[in-house]
Each structure stands twice: as C-alpha cells, then as structure tokens.
Amino acid sequence: MMTGSHSTASRWRQENEDEQHMRVCQHCRLPYDWRRSPSGSLKMTYCGSLCEKADLGFTIETLLCEVQVVRLDWKELLAA
C-alpha cells in the first residue's frame, strides 16, 4: 500500500518526465508530447501530420510513398 508522500513523489516524478518530452509545434505553436505525435518523420517539429502538411505543403510520408521503382525491362511496356 502506498503512503501519501510516496504517491505524491511518484506523481511529481511522472509529471517531470512528461515535461521533458514536451515540444512546441513549429506551425501552430501549441505544446505537445512528441512521443504521441502522429507525424511520422518530423515528430520533434510538428504536433501532427496536418501541421506538417500546412507548414511544408506535403508530408515526408507522402513523398516516400509516391516513389515507385520500375524495373528497366518494364519501363518500355509501361510507357506505351
């Protein structure tokens, strides 16, 4: 069973750890916990992919998904 002071110390330690993970979004300027950011590649910069896209005009994931590798022997067939 936890005592009151132990529980308070534990809660303070958790809040202090959470503060270490707080960042300010470069686009909307709101604080966010970067570990929970849905932005894939730029978690430390944007609170989410919507802010990433609003600031850059695209998301890194979109750029990576649009790259397609076509084998040279298929290139002529697909160009027709």
Image (tube, helix red, strand yellow):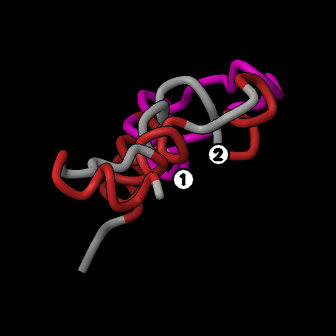
Residues shaded magenta: 17-39
Q: Is residue 68 above or below residue 46?
A: below
Query: Residue tagged by mark 1?
Result: 38
Mark 2–mark 1 distance (CA, rounded to whole Å): 6 Å
Label 2 element class: helix
- Given contact means CB atoms under 8 Å apart, are the residues at marks 2 and 1 in contact? yes
Please indicate whether residue 72 sits to the left or right of residue 69 in the image: left
Q: Residue furthest bottom?
A: 1
The residue shown at (45%, 52%) is: 79
Residue sitting nearer the eye, 4 or 39: 39
Q: Residue 45 at what x, y percent from top left?
A: 56, 23
Inspect the image, locate mark 1, and give the three-letter code of the amino acid beneath it: Pro
Q: Residue 48 at what x, y percent from top left?
A: 64, 45
Q: Is residue 11 above or below residue 52?
A: below
Give me the disc on residue 15: none
Task: Tell me where residue 56 sits by quadrant.
Answer: top right
Inspect the image, locate mark 2, and give the three-letter code of the amino acid beneath it: Ser
Q: Residue furthest top?
A: 26
Task: Assess disc 2: are there few (<14), some (14-19) or many (≥20) residues with their C-alpha within 10 Å of its C-alpha.
Answer: many
The residue shown at (70%, 19%) is: 26
In magenta stretch: residue 30: yes
The residue shown at (24%, 80%) is: 1
Query: Residue tagged by mark 2?
Result: 49
